[in-house]
Every structure is written in C-alpha cells, then in structure tokens.
Amino acid sequence: MSEHTRTRQQHEEQTTESTESESTACPECSGSLVIDDEHGETVCEDCGLVVESDEIDRGPEWRAFDSSEKDEKSRVGAPTTNMMHDKGLSTNIDWRDKDAYGNSLSGKQRQKMQRLRKWNERFRTRDSKERNLKQALGEIDRMASALGLPENVRETASVIYRRALDEDLLPGRSIEGVSTASVYAAARQAGVPRSLDEITEVSRVEKSEIARTYRYVVRELSLEVRPADPESYVPRFASSLELSDEAEHRARQLLQNAKEQGVHSGKSPVGLAAAAVYAAALLTNEKTTQAAVSEVADISEVTIRNRYHELLEAEQDLPVA
DNA sequence: ATGGTTTTTACTGCGTC
DNA sequence: GACGCGGTAAAAACCAT
C-alpha cells in the first residue's frame, strides 16, 4: 500500500521534470531557445537564429490588453477530461466556510451551505453508474501510476471503461476486472504495452480473470488492438539493463529484420523483444546475461535462447548493408 | 473437450574465471 | 566451485476448433 503511493510520487516527479527541461541549446551559439508563439517560430535568444518555423500557434486568435479584456474575450474554461467521472463539469462546493471574498460565513449561512453540500454530493453521484465510474476511474488511475503509464493512456482507459459501462458490459463482471482490462487495452493501443504479468502485479484481480475480461471487452466494443509490437518493449528493457543506445538500435534492427522474414507469427512479442535485446548486447559487446534479461522481461531463459538463435539466423539469411 | 503449439520448469554437461 | 551458456524432456499454459 505504501508502495503504491511511492511509485505514484515518483511518477509525478518524473513528469514535472520532463516538462520543465524542454528548452534546448541553440546549434549556432548554444544560447537558450525561446518559442515565439506569435510568429510560430523557435528562435535563439542570443543570436536570433530561427530554428523552427511554421509551427502551430495554439494561442488564441485575439489579443487582450488587460486582464479584464482577457476574461471577456476568452471563450474557453477548464478542459474537460474523461478521467473524472463527471468529466470535471459538475459543481463543487468548497468545504471552507468562506464566501467568494474570503470572508467567513454567518452561522445561518453555514448551515445552509452544509445542506447544499450534502445534496450537491447526492446528485453528483446520483445513480449507480456514476458511483461505479467514480470507483473505476480511481482504480485506473492507481494502476496507471503504478505502471508508470503516461496520461494519455489513462485517458484512453477511461474512455474504454466508459464505453463498457454504456454498453452494459458490467453486470457479472467486477469493476476491478474491467478497469484492469481497460488499462491493459489502452496501454497496448497507445503503443506502450505492459505484459499481462506486469498488469497483474498492480491489479487486485487474478490474471485469468483479466485475460477473460479483456477479451470480452475487446470483442464487445470491437476495439482494434493489434498484437503488441515487440519493438515497443525494447526501450524499457534496454534502459533497465543500462544498455547503450547503439545496442537498443541494434535490437530494433534485428526485430525489423525478423518481421520482414516472418519469423514472428505465434511467438510471444515479449520473448522476441527480450531475445533481441540480449542478442544486441552481445553484438555490441556489452555485458548482460540471459538471466538478467529474463529478469526484466519476465521471460524464461530458454525462450530467450530459442528466440535469439532464430533472430541471428534471420539476420544471416538477409545481410544488411 | 481436444489437439497442436508455445512457454516454462527442471536438470545436465561444458567451458571459463 | 560458481557462473554463464547450451541443450533436452516433460509439464503447463495457451489457442482454435
């Protein structure tokens, strides 16, 4: 339980870090780059070199000369999100007994607010579906955090769950089960797949049930989920084994090669990826053991051996320039 | 339920540090 | 002797029928 909160914190730290460290250096004078929204250009602060132009201007098309004018002209509010059970659109009454100016409320007013709060809450989570969603989205969020999945996956998972709920797929199935299946499907669709085992780690439901529910949901919603691409596992494995970019690249090549020759088909994508990573490490003279790869990939050493022989054979049959 | 395929488990032999 | 690696056989898991 403390483990979950810890991983969530770690993940949040990571995301905030990545957004902050967006400014890169200028190729000419190594000054810092500044994004000029008005002209859609990325320019160097020091030498004025335009690094990129014709970017999309995501700002408003109007100009405001003071803050009141800005309020007047703006046509947007907070973005809606599928991650909240009511898409973030409902009213919330603050728990603090203060009015809009921060002044305390009279006793009479306080009682009134108390009643309003109670009823607002009752209406907000009115029927069983809403309550269901509320819990499920919490679960989705928790699992996605524990797995280090990006926000857009959480969004997709939420959408999938919402659809499942709308189509009345829930009766007979547990909320956790469907939530987990949604996360699994969303991760795969987004190209950042997690293996069933990894998913099982963070879910409260057994693997067999997850698999069963997943198949059911995919079929009923006719979701398009292609078999996971082995390549999408490579970066994760490579980085947890602390391999070089070169090895990672090499692993990709091996997989692409194998794909062209159809060595795939029927073999587990995870096993293929693990084998490619191991083979690549060998080819670039980096120290790794089959045991280590099998550890991070959750695949038996035997499978790695079998796959990586096949990969290397395929490589020989079709030499790359 | 069944049969075929893939993956895992467990064990063994070989070479090296 | 422990370790990394390769191979094998049998069991288990998986999938389509």
Image (tube, coloured by chain):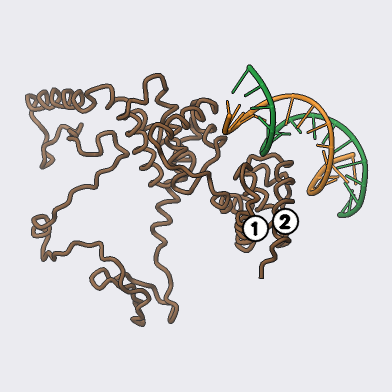
Chain colours: A brown, B green, C orange
The residue marked by circle 1 belongs to what chain? A
Q: Does the rendering let one see residue A243?
A: no
Q: Are marks 1 and 2 on the same chain?
A: yes
The image quadrant of residue A244 is bottom right
- Quarter of the image for the C terminus of chain A: give it: bottom right
In the image, taking residue A77 as reference, residue A51 lies left or right, namely right
The image quadrant of residue A312 is bottom right
Name the residue nearer the viewer: A296 or A259: A259
For marks 1 and 2, give the CA distance.
Answer: 8 Å
Name the residue nearer the viewer: A253 or A290: A253
Instruction: Look at the numbered disc 1 and give the secondary structure of its residue.
Output: helix
Residue at the spot 16% in from the left edge and 64% down from the top edge: A61
Q: Are marks 1 and 2 in contact (CB under 8 Å)?
A: yes
Badge 2 density bin: few <14, some 14–19, many ≥20, Cα 10 Å? some
Q: Which residue is mark 2?
A: A312
Residue at the spot 39% in from the left edge and 39% down from the top edge: A157
Name the residue nearer the viewer: A68 or A219: A219
| Position above or below: A4 against A33 | above
Q: Which residue is mark 1?
A: A254
